[in-house]
Image (cartoon, helix red, strand yellow):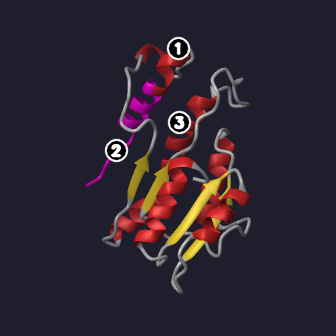
Amino acid sequence: MTSSIGEGIVRAFARNTDGNVHIIILGRYRSSADAIIASLPKHENGLYEFVAVDAVLMRNVAAACTELKTNANGQLQAPLLKINYLVLSQGAVLFGAPDTEDGHNPMTALALYGRIRAILELVSLLEKAAELGEDGRVMSIGAAGIGGPVDLSDVGMKKTSYLKLRGALVSTVDISILVRS
């Protein structure tokens, strides 16, 4: 959330709430998050925080989610009791990058596995918001609504060509997320 559309969403949300909001930015670069936070509107009840994560590895995604729930490493002012909006906009990596330590194509790790892992790890906090009568929603931003066919015989997308990978990933994430109204 420290560049591109993620940064834009943070800025728009802060602006539209006049800073009366609690936003936690997760990303690789604290310096980028700090620059964004410094430019956001201030409010006495507002809070902007940062949790470091390189979301290409699933253990990092799990650790960041644990940090949100427990504040074990003291990256937050306090553990989260609920989440109203979980926005997932992990960036992409260059085609041809080597597989991760987890054995995943980095693009698949960011666009699919990391997103689903984050949702599963944080669903209890989304449900808590809903129990309180508040929004508990997930937004996953992939390719601006442009998906593609999914080969069910290659769910791990190891054989999917790079030209078709992004569309397949977007479609797979879309069908993986259950929306509660």
Q: Quadrant of residue 17?
A: bottom left
In the depicted structure, whether residue 53 falls above or below residue 143: below
**CA distance for labels 3 and 2:** 17 Å
How far from the left and from the top, in percent, is residue 126? 42, 60
**Residue span colored magenta:** 167-181
In the depicted structure, whether residue 161 falls above or below residue 13: above
Where is the C terminus found, in terms of image quarters?
A: bottom left
Element under disc 2 = loop
The residue under label 3 is: 111
Mark nearer the N terminus (2 vs 1)? 1
Residue name at image x 49 percent, y 76 percent: 19
Q: Farthest residue toward the front?
A: 39
Q: Which one is in front in this view, the residue at disc 2 or the one at disc 1?
A: 1
Mark nearer the N terminus (3 vs 2)? 3
The residue under label 2 is: 178
**CA distance for labels 2 and 1:** 27 Å
Element under disc 1 = loop
Q: Quadrant of residue 80?
A: bottom right
The residue under label 1 is: 161
Q: Is residue 39 left or right of residue 135?
A: right
Q: Farthest residue toward the bottom?
A: 44
How far from the left and from the top, in percent, is residue 143? 44, 35
